[in-house]
C-alpha cells in the first residue's frame, strides 16, 4: 500500500535553532522555502557524525533548488560550498550524493513511484528531494547501512519537512529498502524480531 503524504507539505523550520551555515550569496532558488532550508530545525549532531549529516543536509538544499529551478550538479555544488560550509561537511561525499542523485533522478523516481500515494510530481519539493536522496543511498551506496540511510532521511524530514513528513518518508523508504537491500533487511529483521531501524519504525518485513 502506498504511503500517504501529510496534508501540510510546506517547508517548516522551527525558530530559535542554529543554522547549518550561512546561505550562499547567490541562492540556488529564489524562494522563501529555499531560504528556510539554510536553517534546520535541529541543532547539529556530534562532530564525529556531523560532517556526513551536514553533507546530506547541504545536498538536500541543492536538490530542493534543482527541483525548483534546474541547473547542473557541479554548478549547484560550487554555489553551496562556501568556505564556511566546506569546513563543516564531507566535501567528497557531498559532491557524490548530490551529483549521483541528480544524475539518476529519473531512475530513482521509478523505484519509489509505486510506494507513494500520489504522482511523484505532486509531492512537496522537500519530500521529493529527501526521497530521491534516500533512494540514491539505498541503491547506489551499499557501504552505507540501510538503517543509517533511512534514519538520516528521517532526520532531514524532521528538520525541514512538514509536521508528519518524517513518517511518510520513513514508510516509503522502509518499503524501498525491503526491495533494494533485501538480504541486509532480512538479516536485520530476523535478528531483531521485527524491531528494525533502531526502533524508529515498526520494522521492515522484506518482500518475497
Image (cartoon, rainbow, N blue to C red):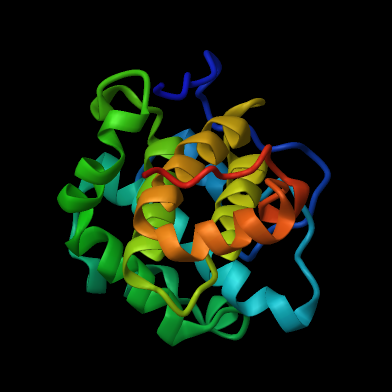
Q: Taking 188 as reference, is 208 left or right?
A: left
Q: Is residue 162 visible?
A: no
Q: Quadrant of the C terminus?
A: top left
Q: Taking 29 as reference, is 90 left or right?
A: right
Q: Residue at 34% x, 49% y: name it.
A: 65
Which one is in front, 147 or 27? 147
Please tell me whether residue 15 is drawn above or below residue 46 in the rendered image: above
Number of marks present in the image shown: 0
Q: Is residue 168 visible?
A: yes
Q: Residue furthest top?
A: 7
Q: What is the x, y in percent for residue 38? A: 57, 53
Q: Residue at 42% x, 86% y: name it.
A: 92
Q: Taking 195 as reference, is 137 left or right?
A: left
Residue 203 is drawn in which quadrant? top right
Residue 147 is drawn in which quadrant? bottom right
Which one is in front, 178 or 190? 190
Q: Residue at 27% x, 69% y: name it.
A: 100
Please tell me whether residue 126 is drawn above or below residue 45 in the rendered image: above
Q: Quadrant of the N terminus?
A: top left
Q: What is the x, y in percent for residue 167? A: 61, 32
Q: What is the x, y in percent for residue 45? A: 77, 67
Q: Residue at 60% x, 85% y: name it.
A: 87
Amino acid at each position: 500500500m502506498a504511503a500517504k503524504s501529510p496534508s501540510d507539505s510546506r517547508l517548516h523550520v522551527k525558530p530559535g535553532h542554529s543554522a547549518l551555515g550561512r546561505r550562499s550569496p547567490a541562492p540556488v532558488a529564489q524562494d522563501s522555502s529555499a531560504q528556510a532550508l539554510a536553517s534546520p530545525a535541529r541543532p547539529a549532531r556530534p562532530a564525529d557524525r556531523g560532517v556526513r549529516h551536514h553533507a546530506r543536509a547541504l545536498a538536500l538544499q541543492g536538490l530542493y533548488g534543482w527541483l525548483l529551478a534546474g541547473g547542473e550538479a557541479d554548478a549547484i555544488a560550487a554555489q553551496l560550498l562556501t568556505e564556511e560550509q566546506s569546513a563543516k561537511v564531507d566535501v567528497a561525499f557531498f559532491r557524490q550524493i548530490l551529483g549521483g542523485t541528480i544524475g539518476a533522478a529519473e531512475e530513482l523516481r521509478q523505484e519509489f513511484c509505486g510506494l507513494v500515494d500520489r504522482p511523484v510530481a505532486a509531492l512537496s519539493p522537500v519530500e521529493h528531494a529527501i526521497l530521491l536522496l534516500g533512494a540514491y543511498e539505498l541503491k547506489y551506496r551499499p557501504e552505507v547501512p540501510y538503517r543509517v540511510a533511512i534514519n538520516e532521511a528521517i532526520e532531514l524530514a524532521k528538520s525541514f519537512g512538514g509536521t508528519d513528513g518524517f513518517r511518510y518518508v520513513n514508510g516509503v523508504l522502509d518499503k524501498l529498502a525491503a526491495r533494494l537491500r533485501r538480504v541486509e533487511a532480512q538479516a536485520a529483521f530476523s535478528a531483531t524480531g521485527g524491531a528494525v531501524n533502531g526502533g524508529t519504525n515498526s520494522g521492515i518485513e522484506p518482500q518475497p
